[in-house]
Amino acid sequence: MSAAPWLSVVVPVFNEELNLPVLFGRLYPVLDGLGRPYEVIFTNDGSSDRSFELLKARHAERPDVTRVIDFNANYGQHMAIMAAFERVRGEVVVTLDADLQNPPEEIPKLLTLIDAGHDYVGGYRLHRHDSLFRTLASKVINGVRRRTTNIEMTDQGCMLRAYRRPVIDAIVRSGAINTFIPALAYSFSGNPAEVGVGHAERHAGVSNYSFYKLVRLNFDLITGFSLAPLQVFTMFALCCSVGSLALVVVLAYRRLFLGAEAEGIFTLFGIVFFLLSVAMVGIGLIGEYVGRTYQVVRARQQYHVREVLESRKAPGG
């Protein structure tokens, strides 16, 4: 590279061979038009299609501005982004999905706010082109997150975001494993902002986020930034205990003054099964927090890079 990049664009890739040619044709002209030095870092997250071959070809065509990180397996979007964050050279970092639902042409909107002095700019999708189920689920999840954490985001599902380098460095130093990156960035930001960005239907293929993955993502978000789930469960368990005690008193009264009742056995069974289910939920919730702690303290390598394609010429050289 002839100069150290001012902008680093991070793009995680998993089975996107149908979208990559179109992405290349739209992303690079936008970045060339900025008039600032940049780099694009693609992380191939263990794709099983021809995504890596297309990324290799793109690197061969534009080695001065293209870098490719190749994972040996699929480690998830979070790790794909973190691997790129650990290697970015730019003073400003933009994250972008490869499916073209967030148009690359919207990147200048974010950079305008970065130039205005903000250190973190989140995008929120205008006129979403998602299914009714995903749109409603997103609204519910956003509402739960607002009430259980101090993270203020209009649209936590939008990948198009811009960060100043100090925020990125703080994320990398945190050693976060499962934490939702935009929320973590918000906690490190001193002057965050948001801007509406366009949204389109996925250009090709199907979403790699299943319903289970979406639930896990948002569960990680809530448990990673709040003790509210534990506190709510404690209050619920306390109410159950009071109710159970009251029911035991009622049953004891009926036993002593009204005589034995066969149906009372089934009532007790119902109480026991309910309390057991409450206890199991509590154990699972506590286990989630303990498991997150265990993942951090064991300090095991979270991903393995098989290959990195980049220019051997040092930035600024």
Image (cartoon, grey):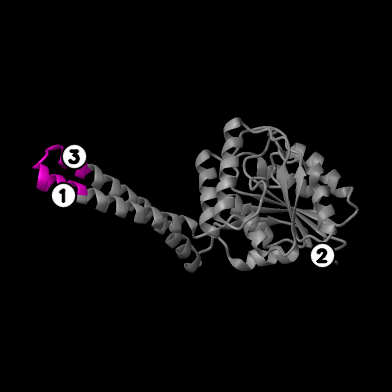
Q: Main secondary structure of the magenta part?
A: helix
Q: Three-letter amino acid code at disc 3?
A: Phe
Based on the displayed image, in which of its 4 quarters is residue 269 positioned?
A: top left
Q: Three-letter amino acid code at disc 1?
A: Ala
Any magenta on residue 190? no
In percent of width and height, residue 248 lies at: 21, 50
Q: Secondary structure at mark 2?
A: loop
Q: Are marks 2 and 3 in contact (CB under 8 Å)?
A: no
Front label number (1 vs 3): 1
Residue 225 in view here: yes
- Left or right: residue 227 versus residue 31 is left
Q: Residues within 10 Å of mark 3 (few under 14, many from 20)?
A: few
Disc 1: which residue: 252
Range covered by the magenta-colored residues: 250-269
Spatial CA distance of label 2 from label 3 is: 74 Å
Q: Are marks 1 and 2 in contact (CB under 8 Å)?
A: no
